[in-house]
Amino acid sequence: MRTIWDMAAPVHNGVVTCEFGVAGRHGPHPGRDYRAAHGTPVRATLAGVVVRVEGDEVVVESNAIWHVYGHLTEFAVRRGDTVETGDRLGLAVGPNLHYEERTNPYRPGDHRSPQFDLHPNARLPS
């Protein structure tokens, strides 16, 4: 069983700017957005295997959950790499980092409310 110490926020001192499920012009938001200036290091929330590095996105599979990190550049990983919790995946393009969790079969509609990214150093909007 995972504990809070087995996971990490994807950005240091992360501030959530948009929560999962918030209504937007394209429907409910499928993940959680964090404020992340250009060049902010983005880190793995859980250990796993990198299954995709494409466009501005890195996907890490951990325990049959896809952890999707969007709006990245200067990738520090490649497909097939094994990452540990807190390993750097790349840098944020800015002004935010998009993080979501998808369940099998991992299509865009198979997202769930993120459970593995909140850590004591992450602050929710008031």
Image (spheres, grey):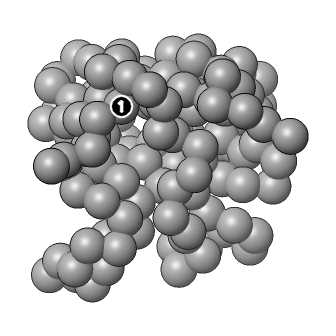
Q: Can residue 59 be seen in this view?
A: no
Q: How crowded is mark 1: few (under 14 residues within 10 Å), some or many (20 or more)?
A: some
| Residue carrying label 1 | 122
Name the residue: 55% across, 68% down. 112
Which amino acid type corresponds to the residue marked 1 in the rendered image? Ala
Q: Position of residue 30 (x, y in %)?
A: 40, 68
Q: Where is residue 65 in the image (x, y as percent from the top left)?
A: 72, 54
Q: In this view, does 122 lie above or below 29?
A: above
Q: Position of residue 85 (x, y in %)?
A: 65, 21
Residues 79 and 112: in front is 112
Name the residue: 71% across, 19% down. 84
**In the rendered image, which quarter contains the N terminus?**
top right
Residues 57 and 101: in front is 101
Q: Where is residue 116 in the image (x, y as percent from the top left)?
A: 59, 43
Of helix, strand and loop, which one carries label 1? loop
Residues 50 and 55: in front is 50
Q: Is residue 67 above or below residue 14?
A: below
Name the residue: 42% across, 48% down. 99
Name the residue: 35% across, 18% down. 12
Left or right: 71, with 75 as reference point: left
Q: Using the rendered view, name the quadrant where residue 105 is placed.
A: bottom right
Q: Is residue 84 visible?
A: yes
Left or right: 110, with 28 as reference point: right
Left or right: 78, with 41 as reference point: right
